[in-house]
Amino acid sequence: MEDQKTLLQAFNQTTYQLAGHSKRDIRQLQLVFQELDGDLQADVYGTGAVIENFQHKMAKYLGKESAVFFPSGTMAQQIAMRIWSEEKGINRVAYHPLCHLEIHEEEGLRKLHGIDAVLLADKHRVIALDDVLGMTEEISCLLLELPQREIGGQLPSYEELQAISRHCKEKGIRLHLDGARLLEILPYYQKTAEEVCALFDSVYISMYKGVGGIAGAILAGDETFTKEAVIWKRRHGGDLISLYPYILTAEANFEARKGKFGEYYEQAKDLAGRYNQCHGVTTIPAVPVSNMFHVHVRLPKERFEQILLSICEETGVGISHYARKVDEHSSYYEVSIGDRYANVPAEKLASVFQVLDQKLREACQE
Amino acid sequence: MEDQKTLLQAFNQTTYQLAGHSKRDIRQLQLVFQELDGDLQADVYGTGAVIENFQHKMAKYLGKESAVFFPSGTMAQQIAMRIWSEEKGINRVAYHPLCHLEIHEEEGLRKLHGIDAVLLADKHRVIALDDVLGMTEEISCLLLELPQREIGGQLPSYEELQAISRHCKEKGIRLHLDGARLLEILPYYQKTAEEVCALFDSVYISMYKGVGGIAGAILAGDETFTKEAVIWKRRHGGDLISLYPYILTAEANFEARKGKFGEYYEQAKDLAGRYNQCHGVTTIPAVPVSNMFHVHVRLPKERFEQILLSICEETGVGISHYARKVDEHSSYYEVSIGDRYANVPAEKLASVFQVLDQKLREACQE
């Protein structure tokens, strides 16, 4: 008896996929390294051309004095919170209830740094100036995640952002940007990275996600800040003897993709539009403000996964390799547009959404 | 006018080098990855065959229930100290004054984990049972570094080690092995990794150094311990989305070199013997107990570096690419035998040491 195929297996066998850049296999690294000169010297504990040149490049791109390459954003952001908290002598920061530090880091900020967090806004919307004005506790730093990933990649208006920045400056509150997906928001704001980062004291940007590297992060700010960050990187065990496998793949992918985020944004709006025309589907946001959005469907997770699997098999197009439960009656998944979307033929795309709509209509009548 | 050539530049232009495996360039990664199937799936946040299989292999090799791959030993060891400190409710551990945690980690243990350290023994010898018996403070964990790198790679006798292990077990003190260079000591002790590790509750081993990978570390112990270590790895920002660039190079180099440490050990004794016959030179230890030792010379650093440079140029053999100051009158460097030593022709080696001896005699008469 044959085992039942899982959605992930079916997805991996499709010809086209609607989201992401590519499979997560080691070819990604091989392709970058086969183009490089083998004599290129490894970085050694944060020194050497490989790391220094890339840090300079990213500092310039972000409009900051200085930048440090980190193995992870988790490490980079906790360290930013620690530096600002020590500067002010207040071990309290503020961020969104669905901030990465709150839900994905096993309380690292508290258990390693002794820093507590005030949660601003509620789980369904982004932080607004009124939330900041309404805080009763004193904080050293406010962290804003742009876009707010866990709610489909929502953004405040640029004017709201400017107002929050002005307020923090006046009140002596450091403003930190969780810009894991910073490049992804520039087309919507119609701003350069430098313009957005100018509103913040410190900035983190991920080297995978939209950029499409293997792992790694950049933390940028003024030199006083990054000098301290380098010491904290050593303390955290992040000052590896060599980080070049991540740096060189980050740089190659950054160069290849930095000009493509406008295209991803347009494609995200197109794709979200197609979803929203399907029975029982809504996207959050309704109109994307970056390359990402969430697809919510009024079907239980298991039922929806059956449909996703059958679409893989019938059309050769992978819509999503998973669905997550919202409640007994509904489920969702995340979409981040990458290189793959442009490869899907227009007629294929149209027919996939016809099939999806049809299947959802049938399922909702069951 | 031509700039004066530095010792490092001259060293990098030599045909043969006495220490190490190879240059630190990116070819090391290229060579491993060009042999691998591009379809191999990346590890994702600590899951997937690439990371799980290697962890199983290393756990078995070390004779422990479970092992976790870390980006760095700094992170792995601080976490081991934290787990044992929380278990006992005592935020104090003990180690050697030249322990990596004491001198290379910017006080990470105290500043991230709030753990203080008792320094045992003095800077010139390894920790003995008497040092442990003489402690007045209660500790959660004793860390032993084998070999003690900063003093030339010295070791206690195996009987001393067993006695310390027995004492710790009786007193409820956890014993942790800083086995950054664990493979390097097995030939001297004539023990398997499993036998040495059985004396310890937790073990760290480096994936570069003797193994010759790019970076990374293994932390091993029982399952209760490693389950906690995985959570702390997330907190530290060490749970990267993919660690495969380090894991796959670690595994390839581990397989290629795990049988070669007996040879390195014999070569280290041979090489140290040659040094000790030179004028004004002593090695620490006098007879190596691993693949490493320190070379001490009764000449100021600058004068000794001139000699090292001239030997590079006259013989085409690189003895060391640096020297460090001990005091106004003497200097030293570290030697770790690796793959390179076997490539040096016997007559070349003999002539280099004749030249070195001659130059040192002349210099000492200046």
Image (cartoon, coloured by chain):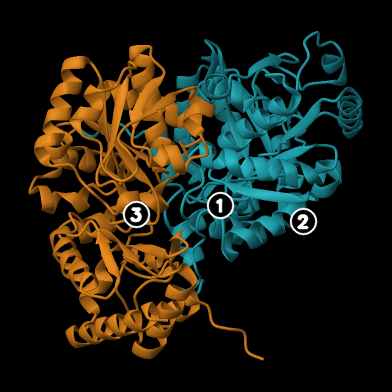
Chain colours: A orange, B cyan
Q: Chain of mark 3?
A: A
Residue under label 3, please give it.
A208
Q: The disc labelled 1 sits on which kind of residue?
A: Gly
Out of B330 and B131, give the one closest to the viewer.
Answer: B131
Which of the two marks, 1 or 2, is nearer to us in this view? Answer: 2
Residue type highlighted by circle 3? Tyr
Q: Where in the figure is residue B121, as x and y percent of width and height?
A: 76, 15
Q: Quadrant of residue A39?
A: bottom left
Residue A341 horizontal/vertical position (percent): 24, 73
For numbered disc 3, what is the local secondary structure?
A: loop
- Sequence order check, earlier mark of 1 and 2: 2
Instruction: State the residue position of label 2.
Output: B60
Q: Amino acid at mark 2?
A: Lys
Classify residue A79 by image quadrant: top left
In the foreground, B121 or B55: B55
Total numbered circles: 3
Which residue carries the number 1 mark?
A: B213
The secondary structure type at the circle numbered 1 is loop
Viewport quadrant of the N terminus of chain A: bottom right
Give the crowd class for mark 1: few <14, some 14-19, many >=20 residues within 10 Å.
many
> Pointers 3 and 1 in contact (CB under 8 A)?
no
Q: Is residue B28 left or right of residue B93?
A: left
Identify the residue at horizontal 65%, vertical 24% (top origin). Answer: B99
Expressed as whole percent of the image width and height from the top left, the position of residue B135 reads 81, 11
Disc 2: CA contacts within 10 A as few (<14), some (14-19) or many (>=20) = some
Q: Are marks 1 and 2 in contact (CB under 8 Å)?
A: no
Q: Which of the chains bears the disc numbered 2?
A: B
- Residue at left offset 47%, top offset 49%: B240
Q: CA distance from mark 2 to mark 3?
A: 33 Å
Q: Residue A7 versus residue A66: which sits nearer the camera? A: A7
Left or right: residue B14 versus residue B362 is: left
Marks 1/2: CA–CA distance = 19 Å
